[in-house]
Image (cartoon, rainbow, N blue to C red):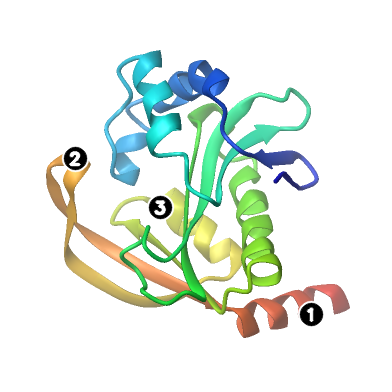
Amino acid sequence: MTLQTERLTLRRWEETDAESLYEYASDPDVGPIAGWPPHKSIEESREVIRNVFCGEECYAICEKRSGKVIGAIELKLNGHTDMTEQNDECELGYWLGKPFWGRGYMPEAAEEMLRHGFEDLGMNIIWCGYYDRNSKSERVQEKVGFLYHHTCSEVPVPLMNEVRVGHTNYMTKEQWEKRHTKAEKE
């Protein structure tokens, strides 16, 4: 399945994306703030594509203009998230290569994933979180309309061998529909 926005294509990951993935995932400003260490090789990125980016609703974010992979976005379904055990709820996760920060790409991709989750997959709640000091992720969640749910002061981050403060937000289908009805009227 492929999803489209004005400037982006969201599509399944392919092993041939490993070089582009490595280019951005090796940046120490990208992974650690999201809870994973920088990639050390193209082969490591290829393994991530095979074993991590293989989820049913995991997509490569590609610029339409260039076709280049610039990030990742996923709806983590029941069994692949610790935020919910409900089949009609999921977790939104994402990251974007640093050269593409500040262009509005992530809110654009997140809006499409919310639409997909609520309209195509029948979700009733979509959860999303960020770690303390990840202001970019916090801002994306604010822009697309997530609401604060709770903060946990001791969240294990196993890939970084750390414990962090985590903030959890949510959006219901009803909230999403109201937001989009209001936007259409304006």
User: What residue is at 39 percent from the left and 39 percent from the top?
Assistant: 52
Q: CA distance from mark 1 to mark 3?
A: 28 Å
Q: Position of residue 35 (x, y in %)?
A: 28, 44
Where the C terminus falls, by quadrant?
bottom right
User: Which dot marks residue 135?
Assistant: 3
Please tell me whether residue 141 is drawn above or below residue 133 in the rendered image: below
| Closer-to-camera residue (43/150) | 43
| Closer-to-camera residue (104/172) | 172
User: Which dot marks residue 80?
Assistant: none
Give the quarter of the image for residue 91: bottom left
Secondary-structure class at tag 1: helix
- Which amino acid, mark 1? Thr
Mark 2 and mark 3 residues within 8 Å of each other at the beta carbon: no
Q: Which residue is mark 2?
A: 160
- Which amino acid, mark 3? Ser
Q: Which residue is mark 1?
A: 181
Other residues around mark 2 within 10 Å, as few (<14) / some (14–19) / many (≥20) = some
Q: CA distance from mark 2 to mark 3?
A: 19 Å
User: What residue is at 28 percent from the left and 56 percent from the top?
Assistant: 132
Secondary-structure class at tag 2: helix
Mark 1 or 3: in front is 1
Q: Position of residue 133 (x, y in %)?
A: 31, 52
**Residue 148 placement, left or right of 19:** left
The mark nearer the N terminus, 2 or 3, is 3
Please tell me whether residue 60 is drawn above or below residue 168 in the rendered image: above
**Residue 149 placement, left or right of 59:** left
The mark nearer the N terminus, 1 or 3, is 3
The mark nearer the N terminus, 1 or 2, is 2
Q: Position of residue 136 (x, y in %)?
A: 45, 49
